[in-house]
Amino acid sequence: MLNPGSGDKEKRGKDFIRVIIEADNVSGRYGGRVETRFPPEPNGYLHIGHAKSICLNFGIAREYGGECHLRFDDTNPEKEELEYVRSIEEDVKWLGFDWGKHLYYASDYYDSFYAYALELIKKGKAYVCDLSADDIRAYRGTPTQPGKNSPFRDRSVDENLMLFERMKNGEFPDGARVLRAKIDMAHPNITMRDPALYRIKRVTHHRTGDKWCIYPMYDFAHPISDAIEKITHSICTLEFEDHRPLYDWLLDNITIDCHPRQVEFARLNLTYTVMSKRKLLELVREGLVAGWDDPRMPTISGLRRRGVTPEAIRAFAERIGVDKTNSTVDVALLEYFIREDLNRRAPRVMGVLRPLKVIIDNYPEGKTEEFDAENNPEDPSAGMRKVIFSREIYIEQDDFREAPPKGYFRLSPGREVRLKHTYYITCQSIVKDEKTGEIAELHCTYDPDSRGGGTPDGRKVQGTLHWVSVAHAVEADVRLYDRLFVAENPDEAAEGGDFRSNINPRSLETLSGCKMEQSIKSAKPGDTFQFLRHGYFCLDRDSADGKPVFNRTATLRDSWAKIEKKK
Ligand code: ATP
Ligand code: MG
C-alpha cells in the first residue's frame, strides 16, 4: 500500500516517463523539445482518472519548459456535445493548468486525414473493403490463429481511389464499405491485421456539420493529430500498448515531418468508485445522482462541488505517480489528501447539526458576550474571529445523555463540561415534551469564574462541546455525503445485478434546521470550513437562493491513517 507520508518525488526517483523524456532530450531526438497533449473525447465530464492524465501531461510540459495541448478528440460524431467541451475546458483550468494558444479539435484535421488516406491508397498501403462487419471479424483470426486476406485486398490503386472518393461523396449506405490499411493478416498483433481507417456514418458533427459522411477511426486520427501538432511524447493509457505498432506504422508510411513517441501508463482505478464515462452517464441519465456535478460523483465538477480543492487533487496525483501495471488505489488515500489540504486552509467554525436547546439559568437575560476564537490552529495567519455567547444556546443532541454509558464524558444530569471558547456549564434539569417524552430542552448553570476555559481552583472537566447562541444562529441545511457505492469494486456485482446493485442507499442524508455561528453569514459558495468535531464542509451554490446549504466534503475520521496503523 502507498504510504501518504512518503510523497516526496525526489526521494522516490523519476518515474519511467520522465526517464524516457530525459533520455530523448539527451539524444536530441526532438531537439530538446517537450510537447504533450491531453486528448479527451467530448462525450462526458472529466473524472479523477482524467485528472491523473491532466496532471501528468501538463505537469511534464511545465517541468521541461514545454507546452501541453488540449485537444478535443471529436472523431466519433454521434456522442459529442458542446456542454462537454465547455465543462472540460472549465475543469482543466480549475485544476490549475493552461493550454495557452494550444486548443485543438481533431475535427479540424479532417481534410488532412483525408489527404493522408489518399496517400496510403496511392502507395498501395490502403484499400477499400466491402466485407460486412461480421465478415471482417471472422476474417481477422484469433490471437493463436492468423487471419485471412479480404477478397478485396488486391484492388488496384485506381479502383481504391475511385471507391474511396465515392464513399466520401455519399454514394454508399452506412457500413457498406470501409477503408483499411494493408499491413499483414497474419501479424501476431491483431491490431495490425489490416485495421479499418475510415467508415461511412451519416451523422451531423458538432463542428463540421454534414460536410462529411465518412469519419476516421481513432487509431488513424490519433497519431496523425499528434504529428500535425508536433507532439513529442504521446502519453496514453495501457490499453493502447497493442496499438503502438500501428501508431508507428502509420507515421512511417505517410509524409509527415514529426513522429511522436507513444508512452503508456496504467489508468487510475479507485475503490468504491466507478470510473467509466458510460457508467457515469447512466447514473446521471437515470437520476441515480443529481447530475454530473453531484458531490458523490468522481467527476472533477463533483469533487469541486463537494469542496475538494485543486491542490488536493494535484497532491494526490503526484503521490500516486505513474506505473506500468494496472492497479486499484484505495479511495481512502484520496480522502486523506482532501483532509490534509482542508486542515491547512479551512477556517474552523461551530455548527450544530442536530440542535438541542440549553438555557443557562444563572446567566443574565438579554446579556451577550463576545469571545475570541482562533480561525485555524494550523495557520496562525488565519487570525481570530468573535463568537457571541448568550443565555440560550444550542448544543448537539448527541452531546447529552440522560443516562450516560460508561466512558461518556459529555453532558449528563449533574455533569460539568466545557463550552468551547467560553465557560463551564453543569446540567441541572431536563424538560421533556409532554406528548412524545423526548427531551425538549436542558437547564444548566454556568461558572462565571471559568471564563475562557479554566477555573481558579484548577477543576478539570473531560468534555468540550461546541455550541451556537440561539439568538445569533444562522439556520442552514447540511448534506451529509457518503460513498456512492458500498462495494469495494462496484463493477463486480452479484449474479443478475450490475454496478447499480452496489449503490449505497444511504449515500446522502439531508439535515435541515442546523444552527451555525453567525460568522458564516459572509461565506460565498465554494468556501470551505471545518465544523468543529464534524468534518469539512463547503457552502453550496444552491445557497444563492437564501438559506445556506453546506455539503460535507469529508469527515474528520481518517481511515487511511487507521489502515496504515493496523499494518
Ligand atoms: P472512459 O473509458 O472512462 O470513457 P476514455 O479513456 O475513453 O475514458 P477519454 O476522453 O478518451 O476517455 O480520455 C482522455 C484522456 O484521459 C486519455 O488520454 C485517457 O488515457 C485519459 N484517461 C481516461 N481515463 C483515465 C484513468 N482512469 N486514468 C488515467 N488516465 C485516464
Ligand atoms: Mg477514449
Image (tube, rainbow, N blue to C red):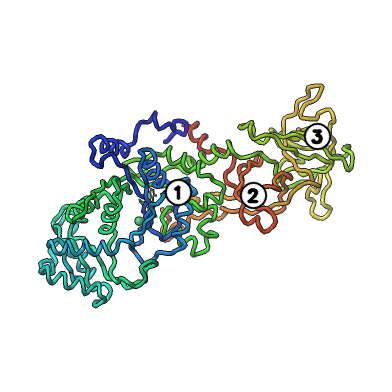
Q: Residue at x 24, y 38 (%)?
A: 28
Farthest residue, direction top? 457
The reply to whether the residue tagged 3 has its Cβ within 8 angstroms of ligand 1 is no
Q: Position of residue 137 (x, y in %)?
A: 21, 64
Q: Position of residue 444 (x, y in %)?
A: 83, 38
What residue does disc 2 label?
524
What residue did someone put label 3 on? Answer: 425
Label 1 CB less than 8 angstroms from ligand 1: yes
Three-letter code, disc 3:
Ile
- Given the image, on which type of amino acid does mark 1 rest? Ile
Q: CA distance from mark 2 to mark 1?
A: 25 Å
When asked about the image quadrant of residue 448, the answer is: top right
Mark closest to the chain's N terminus, 3 or 1: 1
- Residue 408 shows up from this direction: no
Relative to 337, is 395 on the left or the right?
right
**Circle 2 residues within 10 Å: few <14, some 14–19, many ≥20:** some
Secondary structure of the residue carrying numbered label 3: strand
Is 302 on the left-hand or right-hand side of 532? Answer: left
Residue 129 rendering spot, x and y as whole percentages:
18, 69
Name the mark nearer the viewer: 3 or 1: 1
In the picture provided, is 19 more to the left or to the right than 330? Answer: left
Q: Are marks 3 and 2 in contact (CB under 8 Å)?
A: no
Q: Which residue is mark 1?
A: 48
Of 57 and 418, the residue lying toward us = 57
Helix, strand or loop under label 2: loop
Circle nearer the viewer, 2 or 1: 2
